[in-house]
Image: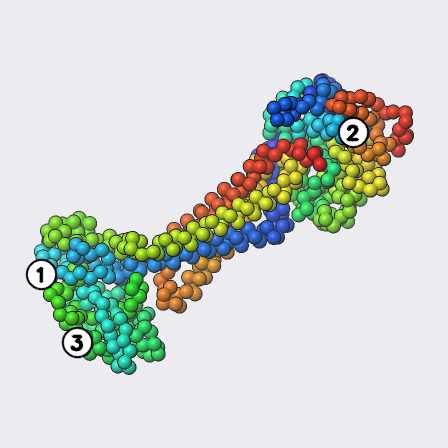
């Protein structure tokens, strides 16, 4: 029996793919319906997932902002970085005494209210960083920041959120504010990662920060620790907990705890999960229905092709190639829309730092491909089972 | 030495039954007939007599319940499905009542489908189908889409598609049923020309007595049986 050579076999598939794509693109209503349906659902999935991940990252950002420390030590009840539960000053020395600790410094983090000279009031997150090492300051503009807060009651401010204190957009450097009846002067600007509270962060020396907060027995929020060379941070954190009874987490563990707190204690996962689910549903419904309609309307033509001698495998390749084409184009439009949204969104402080992670880009690509190929396969099954003699039955 | 059969297709004692609920309906009752090379054979008879079923079985798109089907010395009932599909693609040309042209492909592309599906390079296939279209008088319409053509022109495109790969057997299902008299005559004239080829057989299933004059042989069927096989005296002389 005759059989196709490899080259002509490949050519036959390429040729049939060409016919399939012409069949698809010759029907602009369905073609553009599929492309924009998939594009819209990709946009919905990837954009909502990016915002979701960005919001989750907010819970971790106060930890991620402090790149110099490997371990955070805290009250055992603390679950996330904005949950201040002060520990005694002695904790600092107990931590320093643990074998394997290279250095340990204090870090204070609390809520405060500032009054401006113009009479505005604004809530802020007040951070006190170690007087000598300045560990705890964001990395950006670090040298200038360190110099700027050396003076007494000097503070540097997150430059991304100054509008929340001075709505008139003035340059805050040199501005005086009042915290608990203490006069503070803004001497510099830094750039910190957005945190979940959305409040501006004001950085001061540790001694200044604890001096202006209301009196209470303990004011030390965290002890930041660096392990000696050759000591694994995980092992040292475990040892600190064993020795001091305090909770000690590596930077990565505490950052993860911050995101976990948002997942467990807010409605964000449900609302964004619903939006992402909606995106998947839109993709499935539009793709499956449109492809099914397309195949159904072309059933007689497929029957004729089968009678003429087009194999089931060729027809499968034809329909899959149609699905892949609309999948690729739709996905490109959708992911491009997400990229544009995130790019232009960087100008908005509430979206700053949000990005489409590789996992989101790849995951939504995988999802779209599974949806279009699955829909195509479901649609084409009818054709594969089609009796070619149907074409003679009027 | 290979013995070449004078008949392009032969079916022998073919029975075809279709399931209907719990019953089985027998539509062909042990039919035997052969289709000659170089001739136009017409299969005629009332609706439901089984002529389309014979056409389907002869063209390998439907399997017989029993009996043998031999086309160009190949036993179709013994071929595996993929081989049968390839056999149809290379050896048989199909012309359907409703043309079944793909509306989003132009005339040249439609006519080239059997070649493209067989692995002929796209440009070569278009060139080959283009020559056939030129021969059938459709040269100026190659770039048009089926909706831009009349019914007769569309059926001529279907003929070009059926002949573009030079098949040895051409099967036509009611090729003039959707055409006016003049278009039907023109289409049949082209098929008649194709049937003059001594290496090709043309089988036409039809109701249309206006085209009987093109037949070299007429096989009449009724109730799943052949009741007459030959050119009757009452028919007009072949044109």
Q: Nearer the viewer, residue A347 or A30?
A: A30
Q: Contact (CB < 8 A) between labels 1 and 2?
A: no
Q: Is residue A178 above or below residue A367?
A: below
Residue on which the image places disc 3: A152
Image x and y of residue A349, in percent = 36, 67
Chain of the residue under label 3: A
Question: In the image, are marks 1 and 3 on the same chain?
Answer: yes
Which image quarter holds the C terminus of chain B? top right
Front position among marks 1 and 2: 2
Which image quarter holds the N terminus of chain B? top right
Front position among marks 3 and 2: 2
Q: Is residue B11 above or below residue A138?
A: above
Q: Does residue B201 appear left or right of residue A70 in this picture?
A: right
Image x and y of residue B26, in percent = 68, 22
Q: Is residue A253 above or below residue B16?
A: below
Q: Does residue A74 appear left or right of residue A190 in this picture?
A: left
Q: Nearer the viewer, residue A312 or A231?
A: A312
What residue sits 26% from the left and 81% below the top? Answer: A117
Q: Does residue B123 appear left or right of residue B188 in this picture?
A: left
Element carrying mark 3: loop
Say which quarter of the image contains residue A292. Answer: top right
How far, Cα to Cα, is label 3 from label 2? 109 Å
What residue sits 78% from the left and 47% below the top? Answer: B150
Mark closest to the chain's N terminus, 1 or 3: 1
Is residue B190 shown to the viewer in this render? no
Residue on which the image places disc 1: A90
How far, Cα to Cα, is label 1 from label 3? 24 Å
Residue on which the image places disc 2: B46
Task: Tell which residue pokes out farthest to the bottom in this image.
Answer: A118
Q: Nearer the viewer, residue B91 or A369?
A: A369
The image's mark for residue B192 is: none
Question: In the image, are marks 3 and 2 on the same chain?
Answer: no
């Amino acid at each position: 029996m005759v059989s196709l050579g490899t080259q002509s076999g490949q050519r036959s598939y390429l040729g049939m793919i060409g016919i399939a794509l012409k069949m698809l693109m010759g029907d602009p209503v369905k073609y553009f319906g599929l492309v924009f349906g998939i594009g819209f659902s990709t946009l919905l999935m990837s954009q909502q997932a990016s915002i979701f991940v960005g919001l989750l990252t907010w819970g971790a950002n106060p930890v991620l902002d402090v790149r110099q420390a490997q371990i955070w030590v805290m009250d055992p009840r603390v679950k996330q970085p904005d949950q201040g539960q002060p520990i005694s000053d002695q904790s600092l020395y107990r931590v320093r005494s643990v074998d394997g600790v290279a250095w340990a410094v204090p870090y204070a983090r609390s809520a405060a209210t500032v009054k401006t000279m113009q009479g505005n009031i604004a809530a802020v997150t007040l951070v006190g960083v170690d007087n000598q090492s300045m560990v705890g300051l964001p990395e950006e503009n670090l040298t200038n920041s360190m110099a700027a807060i050396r003076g007494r009651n000097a503070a540097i401010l997150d430059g991304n959120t100054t509008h929340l204190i001075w709505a008139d957009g003035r340059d805050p450097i040199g501005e005086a504010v009042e915290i608990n009846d203490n006069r503070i002067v803004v001497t510099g600007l830094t750039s910190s990662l957005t945190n979940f509270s959305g409040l501006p962060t004001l950085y001061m020396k540790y001694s200044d920060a604890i001096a202006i907060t209301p009196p209470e027995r303990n004011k030390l929020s965290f002890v930041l620790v660096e392990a000696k060379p050759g000591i694994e941070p995980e092992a040292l954190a475990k040892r600190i907990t064993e020795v001091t009874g305090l909770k000690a987490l590596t930077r990565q563990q505490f950052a993860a705890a911050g995101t976990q707190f948002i997942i467990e204690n807010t409605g964000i996962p449900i609302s964004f999960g619903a939006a992402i689910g909606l995106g998947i549903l839109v993709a499935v419904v539009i793709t499956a229905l449109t492809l099914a309609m397309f195949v159904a309307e072309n059933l007689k033509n497929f029957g004729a092709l089968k009678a003429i001698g087009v194999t089931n495998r060729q027809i499968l390749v034809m329909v899959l190639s149609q699905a892949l084409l609309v999948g690729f184009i739709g996905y490109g439009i959708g992911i491009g829309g997400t990229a544009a949204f995130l790019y232009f969104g960087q100008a908005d402080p509430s979206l700053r730092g949000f990005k489409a992670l590789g996992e989101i880009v790849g995951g939504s690509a995988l999802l779209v491909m599974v949806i279009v190929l699955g829909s195509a396969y479901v649609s084409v099954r009818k054709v594969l089972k089609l009796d070619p003699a149907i074409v003679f039955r009027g | 030495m290979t013995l070449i059969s004078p008949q392009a297709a032969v079916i022998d004692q073919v029975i075809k039954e279709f399931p209907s609920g719990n019953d089985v309906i027998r539509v062909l009752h042990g039919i035997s007939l052969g289709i000659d090379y170089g001739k136009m054979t017409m299969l005629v008879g009332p609706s439901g007599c089984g002529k389309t079923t014979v056409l389907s079985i002869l063209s390998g798109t439907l399997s017989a319940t029993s009996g043998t089907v031999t086309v160009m010395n190949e036993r179709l009932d013994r071929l595996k499905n993929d081989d049968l599909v390839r056999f149809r693609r290379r050896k048989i040309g199909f012309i359907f009542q409703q043309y079944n042209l793909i509306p989003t492909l132009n005339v040249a592309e439609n006519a080239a489908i059997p070649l493209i599906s067989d692995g002929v390079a796209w440009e070569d296939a278009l060139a080959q189908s283009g020559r056939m279209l030129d021969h059938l008088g459709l040269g100026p319409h190659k770039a048009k889409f089926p909706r831009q053509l009349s019914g007769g022109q569309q059926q001529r495109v279907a003929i070009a598609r059926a002949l573009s790969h030079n098949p040895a057997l051409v099967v036509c299902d009611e090729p003039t049923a959707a055409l006016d008299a003049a278009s039907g005559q023109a289409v049949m004239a082209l098929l008649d020309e194709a049937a003059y080829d001594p290496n090709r057989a043309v089988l036409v299933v039809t109701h249309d007595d206006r085209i009987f004059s093109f037949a070299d042989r007429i096989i009449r069927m009724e109730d799943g049986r052949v009741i007459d096989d030959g050119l009757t005296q009452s028919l007009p002389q072949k044109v």
